[in-house]
Image (cartoon, helix red, strand yellow):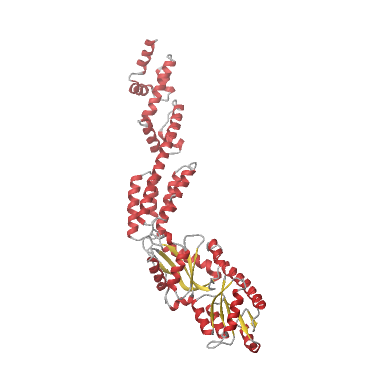
Amino acid sequence: MFTAIIAEDSKPILRNIKALLESSQLEIRVVATAYNGEEALDYLHEHPVDILLTDIRMPKLDGLALIEQAKLLHPQLKVLLISSYSDFEYTRKALNLQVFDYLLKPVERPQLLEVMERMIDQLKKDKKGELEPLLGMVDPAYLHAFELSSDPLEQISYLFVLGKQPFTEGADKWRAQLLQNELSAASAPYKCRVLPLNASNGFIVLLQTAVKEKFPTPAAWMNAVRSRLLEIGVHLSMAGSFQTVERDKLGPRCEQYGRKLNNELNLTASVLLDTDFPIAQQRWDNKALIRDFIDMIHQRQKERFTLKLAEQLQKWQTENRRIGELEDLVNELTNAFIQALPEDELEERMKLAADIPNMYALESYSHFSSELLKWSEKSFEQLHARNRKSGEELFDQINSYVLLHKYSQLSIADLAQKFHVSPSYISRIIKRYTNSTFVHYYMQLKIEEACRLMQAKPELMVKEVSDALSFSDQHYFSRVFKEYAGCSPTEYKEKLRSQT
């Protein structure tokens, strides 16, 4: 529905035009009438209107002056001029003011409806055209609803980007209509339009440039908005400037302001950023810190990691660090935990990453910190569970390999090279599953095999058994055999003969 105001000093003519429009069933609603140009202009100062129907000759302010000043207030305003034959010269001048059309008195219903139908078609085309630069940037559902409204957008305006301050309450009030109401009240009598962004939880504000008459600086306007929203429990950060932006430049400028705001967002205090005079915040190099945390993940140092992370989160809150630093740290930790899990465990890897976004929506930083620490502990438990599983698998592979090479001379370095892990890790795995060192484990297998050989082939000499099992000499073999079997190889052979 489009809105219209009628300015006509003749009461019968005004009533007739109003009645014709209201009975026409066109998408027009007469929102005001005026008996002179000043009354009409006063209304237009306070309210956006789509259509002006005005007489030329009126007291106090004539139709031409009204049109000229109304166009300054609302450049997209459509004007239908009403004149008499004697005013034709005025009508010709009015056409230079981009009047949509004119009608001669007396106004007849068919001519009025024909002009108004054409005017409505043009208004709809204009509406689609002015919204086109917002496609892809503003939430499509909201744009569709906005397209059906008659609320105009300024072709040139100031632009601000709004983002909800992280870790604060008021998420249920972070809605376009509520923000529209509050920002309109804060900016009154000047107009603003709040539009939800498509790719984020943020909003853009298009602000009438005349607002500078009330707020001399962007900071003054942003502080007024923040104060008003804090009264209803909404915490936000903002970025923008009193640089005019044309409609076709909104996309690039919005991205620019959005990046600047994201770069300056803090953990605990909101940011009001005049992009013409950016804040000189201290920048911290956290690369070494992040490497330390990643090393602790690789080394499975759960307790040390948890303690250090808790200390760091508390320190960053005290220092009011930037939210971007926290996001960088959390992203690196997430990647490190995911990479530590095998690629075939896709579900576990995806779940690790999926748990993070919800944490940023929590209403306090302390709650976020608590949940991040719980998430880290759970991630370590997954790694430890995987390590236990992979340790069993690795020991089974080592044991099978060693059993096949009892007749060789294996070292722990050979196993490390074979299974692509460190010698110390091989040592820990064998200790975990045999409760002995690699040397004792390997020698035990060799001596058991020596006993089996001597049972199966009593005719074998001790030296032949020693050589078969790759001992360096017979005396060393005999010494090791006695240590593990409790008797010498010769004594063992005698026991076997006595048993037959």
Residue at 46%, 46% in the rendered image: 351
The answer to whether residue 15 is left or right of residue 439 is right
Q: Is residue 191 visible?
A: yes
Of 83 and 133, which appears nearest the observer?
A: 83
Check the image and report above or below for 284 versus 295: below
Where is residue 235? Give x, y as percent.
39, 63
**Residue 56 quadrant:** bottom right
Task: Check the image and report above or below for 349 versus 396.
Answer: below
Residue placed most toward the observer, 272 or 491: 272
Question: Which image quarter is the C terminus in?
Answer: top left
Q: Quadrant of residue 187?
A: bottom left
Considering depth in this image, is 44 or 385 the residue closer to the camera? 44
Name which residue lies at 40% across and 25% down.
445
Residue extending farthest to the bottom is 86
Screen quadrant of the N terminus: bottom right
Based on the displayed image, in which of its 4 quarters is residue 149 positioned? bottom right
Task: Give how far across and how far down residue 68 sits, in percent.
Answer: 56, 83
Total numbered badges shown on the rendered structure: 0
Please provide percent x and percent y for residue 484.
34, 23
